[in-house]
Image (cartoon, rainbow, N blue to C red):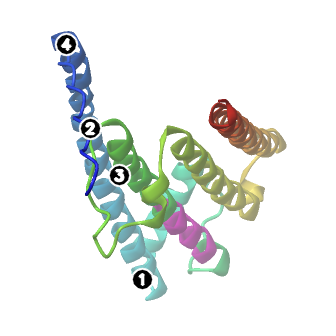
C-alpha cells in the first residue's frame, strides 16, 4: 500500500508590484526587433558587396571603384593610386569584409536569440531539429563570455584587413588598432576568469550546503 502523498503547500500570491516589474521585461522586445532589422541591413550589404566583387571580376571598372571606395571608407584609409584591375589584395580585402559581415551577423543572432531567451521569455526550442547547442546552457554569464569571444574575432578580422593594406595607414593608426585589439583580448580574458571564479564559488557553496547536516 503506497504512502499517502503530502499535500503541496499553497503557492503564495504574487504581489501586483512584482508582477508589474516582471512584465517590464517585454519592453526589450522592440530592441530585439530592431536588431533583426539591423541583421536584414547587413544581409543586403553583404549581397551588394558580393555583387560588386563578381562584376569587378568580370571587368567592370565601376564595380571595382565601388569596392575600392568601400574599403577606404570602411577603414578610414587613403585611396591612393587606384588599380585598373581586380588584384589579389583587393579580393582578399573584400573577402575579409564579407567574413566580417558574417561574424557580425552571428553576433547579432547570438544577442537576439540568447538575450531573448535569458531576459524576456522562453523560446521552447528544445525539440526543434535546428536547436543550437549553445542555447541549451545559456545564461547571462555565458552570454557575456560568448559575446566577448565574438568581438575578439571581429576585431581580429579588422586588424588583419589593416595589416594587409598597411601602406594606407600611418604607424600611429597601426599601433592604435593593435592596442585596441589587445585591450579587447585582455577584457575578454578578464570576463572569462571572473565568470569561472563566480561559478566555482557557487559550486563550493552548494557542496557546503549539501554536506551540512
Magenta stretch, main secondary structure, is helix
What residue do we see at 27% from left, 32% from top?
28
On the image, which quarter does residue 167 sit in? bottom right
For the N terminus, the quadrant is bottom left
What crowding class fits label 3: few (fewer than 14 Cα within 10 Å), some (14-19), or many (20 or more)? some
Q: Report the residue marked by disc 1.
A: 54
What crowding class fits label 1: few (fewer than 14 Cα within 10 Å), some (14-19), or many (20 or more)? few
Dots 1, 3 in contact, CB < 8 A: no
Decide if residue 78 is in sight here: no
Q: Report the residue marked by disc 2.
A: 6
Question: Magenta part of the protein: which range?
Answer: 91-101
Q: Is mark 4 on a helix, strand or loop?
A: loop
The spot of residue 143 in percent (x, y) is 51, 45
- Spatial distance from mark 4 to mark 3, Cα to Cα? 30 Å
Dots 3, 2 in contact, CB < 8 A: no
Q: In this view, does 174 lie to the left or right of 115?
A: right
On the image, which quarter does residue 136 sit in? bottom left
Dots 4, 3 in contact, CB < 8 A: no
What crowding class fits label 2: few (fewer than 14 Cα within 10 Å), some (14-19), or many (20 or more)? few
Q: What element carries label 1?
A: helix
| The stretch drawn in magenta includes residue 166 | no
Q: Which of 187 and 4 is in front in this view?
A: 4
Q: Report the residue marked by disc 3.
A: 113
On the image, which quarter does residue 195 sit in? top right
In primary-sequence order, the first of circles 1 and 2 is: 2
In primary-sequence order, the first of circles 4 and 2 is: 2
For the C terminus, the quadrant is top right
In primary-sequence order, the first of circles 1 and 3 is: 1
What residue do we see at 45% from left, 77% from top?
53
In primary-sequence order, the first of circles 4 and 3 is: 4
- Spatial distance from mark 4 to mark 1, Cα to Cα? 61 Å
Which of discs 4 and 3 lies nearer the camera? The answer is 4
Amino acid at each position: 500500500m503506497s504512502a499517502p502523498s503530502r499535500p503541496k503547500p499553497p503557492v503564495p500570491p504574487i504581489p501586483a508590484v512584482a508582477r508589474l516589474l516582471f512584465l517590464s521585461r517585454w519592453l526589450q522586445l522592440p530592441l530585439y526587433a530592431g536588431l533583426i532589422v539591423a541583421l536584414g541591413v547587413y544581409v543586403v550589404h553583404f549581397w551588394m558587396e558580393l555583387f560588386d566583387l563578381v562584376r569587378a571580376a568580370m571587368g567592370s571598372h565601376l564595380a571595382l571603384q565601388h569596392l575600392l571606395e568601400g574599403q577606404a571608407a570602411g577603414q578610414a584609409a587613403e585611396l591612393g593610386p587606384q588599380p585598373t584591375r581586380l588584384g589579389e589584395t583587393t579580393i582578399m580585402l573584400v573577402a575579409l569584409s564579407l567574413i566580417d559581415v558574417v561574424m557580425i551577423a552571428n553576433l547579432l543572432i547570438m544577442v537576439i536569440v540568447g538575450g531573448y531567451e535569458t531576459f524576456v521569455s522562453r523560446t521552447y526550442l528544445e525539440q526543434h531539429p535546428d536547436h543550437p547547442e549553445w542555447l541549451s546552457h545559456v545564461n547571462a554569464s555565458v552570454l557575456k563570455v560568448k559575446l566577448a569571444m565574438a568581438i575578439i574575432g571581429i576585431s581580429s578580422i579588422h586588424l588583419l584587413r589593416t595589416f594587409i593594406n598597411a601602406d594606407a595607414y600611418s604607424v600611429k593608426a597601426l599601433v592604435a588598432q593593435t592596442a585596441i585589439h589587445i585591450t579587447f583580448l585582455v577584457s575578454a580574458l578578464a570576463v572569462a576568469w571572473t565568470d569561472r571564479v563566480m561559478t566555482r564559488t557557487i559550486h563550493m557553496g552548494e557542496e557546503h550546503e549539501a554536506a551540512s547536516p
